[in-house]
Image (cartoon, helix red, strand yellow):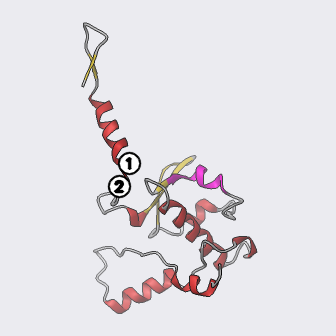
Amino acid sequence: MVNEDKVKKAFKFPIKHGKEWDLDEHDQRKLNLLYTLPLVSPYSDGSKLDLWTVEAEKFRVGLIHEFLSLTLEKRAYIHNIVEFKEEFCLSKHTYQMLLKQPRTFYLAGTEMNWSVFLKDAYGEDGVLLNKDPHVLFNEKLYRYADMIELKPSSDVYEI
């Protein structure tokens, strides 16, 4: 990066506040500062950061946030993320790191098969906000697959 300091200041991702929190503007700004500053650019070289520092953790959180934002469904299995362990400079405590970020990531699944969701990409109803055409196509395909019934008298399927 040409100007790393500029990127560090500019990089941030929005954090939604629950409706049950009646925060005024000053409190929202303070809460956002807690989660956003100082940030480490996910496009910087994370291998130069000490593994157990706050900056390294913020780098990894930002990198996973950026990775998920580039996926079609804004989610990935934890095993798929860990496949990039060396490239993302991840530690063996990635799951615990993600658990400490409940306002950014949502983890769902079983102990061995966790899915990591990018919270700001989903509405309160759990539906993806901006769906890619491929996602829309897959949803339509799944709906049609559920509608197929086998006729008892022949091998023809009807929709």
Task: Reply yes or no: does residue 82 show up in magenta.
Answer: yes
Residue plotted at (36% across, 92% down) = 26
Residue at image coords 33%, 57% = 126
Residue 71 x, y percent position in the rendering: 49, 56
The crowding category of the residue bearing disc 2, from other C-alpha atoms within 10 Å (few below 14, some 14 to 19, many at least 20), is some
Q: CA distance from mark 2 to mark 1?
A: 6 Å
Determine whether the residue tagged by mark 2 lies in a helix, strand or loop. loop
Task: Name, please, the residue furthest toward the front.
Answer: 2
Residue 25: image quadrant is bottom left
Q: Secondary structure at mark 1?
A: helix
96 lies left or right of 36:
right
**Disc 2 to disc 1: CB gap under 8 Å:** yes
Q: Nearer the viewer, residue 33 or 86?
A: 86
Mark 2 lies on residue? 131
Expressed as whole percent of the image width and height from the top left, the position of residue 23 reads 32, 85
Residue 126's place in the image compared with 54, above or below, is above
Q: Is residue 93 left or right of residue 111?
A: right
- Please name the residue shown 69% across and 78% down the image: 53
Indicate which disc residue 135 carries: 1
Q: Tag 1: residue type?
A: Val
> Does 35 sit above or below residue 86?
below
Instruction: Please state if 81 lies on the left or on the right of 153 as rendered.
Output: right
Q: Pinpoint residue 1: horizontal percent, then vertical percent.
A: 65, 78
> In the picture shown, does residue 145 fall above or below 68?
above
Segment colored magenta: 76-84
The image shows a total of numbered marks equal to: 2
Q: Quadrant of residue 96?
A: bottom right
The stretch drawn in magenta includes residue 118: no
